[in-house]
Image: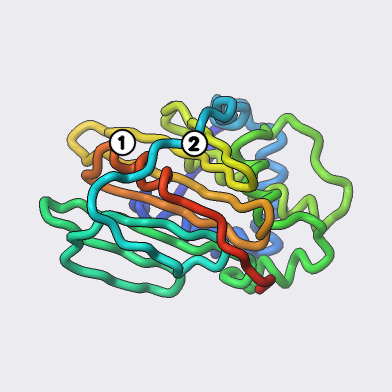
């Protein structure tokens, strides 16, 4: 069964579709379709955790924007742009790094329609990368909606068949992958979870940055204590 996605740049698909899928009717429609999904991404999961990547060795700047995570990013950027919860750093040679804080608070409709869920953002993110659409759906109605929301985003990370890796260090888990499409830039993407602060997820994305440098940025990440939103 094929899933149709609007013709929108994959750079922004995560932000655009999370907003759409916060709607209760859309969540139910997606849930019904996911149960019949026969595509490879529906049953794909991240590889087992490896050791945490080695940290960035070049000049870097500590970022404490995220309430649950500290991260060092490469120095030398020439422009910063903020749009809502998204920070974009532009470097020479068209290299771009995105940092995005994700919480239920960023999606009021999702929050409103899953008031009784026991699932956290961390639970949802782990499910995206370690569960499949063939796994048992939660019994609680609000948990079920949140589960479908998480399952839909398997398509974003697994649809193109690139292996998704994972690394774990204490309370931190990183899920990440790299791909290069024909004629396009190298795209790296990661979701960072701090299980001690399960209400927040940090999403990283880069363009025209080597996979090695991207992994080394992940390697700088440390836990920061966070209060609930």
Is 139 on the left or on the right of 214, as rendered? Answer: right
Q: Is mark 1 on a helix, strand or loop?
A: helix
Q: Where is residue 15 in the image (x, y as percent from the top left)?
A: 47, 60
Q: Is residue 39 above or below residue 12?
A: above
Q: Position of residue 67 (x, y in %)?
A: 55, 68
Is 96 on the left or on the right of 38, as rendered? Answer: left
Quadrant housing residue 56: top left
Q: Where is residue 53 in the image (x, y as percent from the top left)?
A: 43, 36
Q: Position of residue 25 (x, y in %)?
A: 69, 60
Residue bearing mark 1: 211
Camera-side residue of 48 and 207: 48
Residue bearing mark 2: 52
Q: Is residue 162 above or below residue 82?
A: above
Kindly indicate whether the residue at mark 2 contacts the one at mark 1 (C-beta within 8 angstroms).
no
**Residue pictured at 23% horizontal, 59% vertical:** 75
Query: Which mark is in front, 1 or 2?
Result: 2
**Residue pictured at 21% horizontal, 44% vertical:** 208
């Amino acid at each position: 069964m094929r899933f149709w996605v609007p013709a929108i740049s994959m750079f922004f698909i995560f932000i655009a579709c999370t907003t759409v899928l916060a709607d209760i009717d859309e969540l139910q429609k997606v849930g019904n379709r996911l149960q019949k999904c026969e595509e490879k991404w529906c049953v794909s999961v991240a590889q087992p955790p490896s050791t945490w990547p080695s940290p960035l060795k070049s000049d870097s700047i500590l970022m404490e924007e995220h309430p649950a995570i500290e991260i060092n990013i490469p120095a030398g950027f020439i422009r910063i742009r903020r749009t809502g919860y998204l920070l974009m750093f532009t470097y020479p040679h068209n290299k771009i790094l995105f940092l995005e804080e994700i919480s239920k608070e960023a999606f009021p409709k999702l929050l409103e329609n899953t008031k009784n869920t026991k699932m956290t953002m961390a639970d949802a993110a782990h499910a995206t990368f370690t569960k499949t659409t063939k796994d048992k759906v939660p019994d609680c109605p609000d948990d079920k909606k949140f589960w479908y929301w998480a399952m839909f985003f398997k398509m974003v990370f697994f649809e193109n068949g690139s292996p998704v890796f994972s690394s774990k260090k204490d309370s931190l888990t990183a899920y990440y992958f790299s791909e290069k499409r024909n004629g396009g830039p190298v795209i790296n993407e990661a979701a960072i979870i701090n299980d001690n602060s399960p209400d927040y997820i940090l999403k990283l994305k880069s363009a025209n940055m080597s996979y090695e440098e991207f992994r080394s940025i992940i390697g700088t990440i440390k836990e920061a204590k966070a209060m609930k939103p």
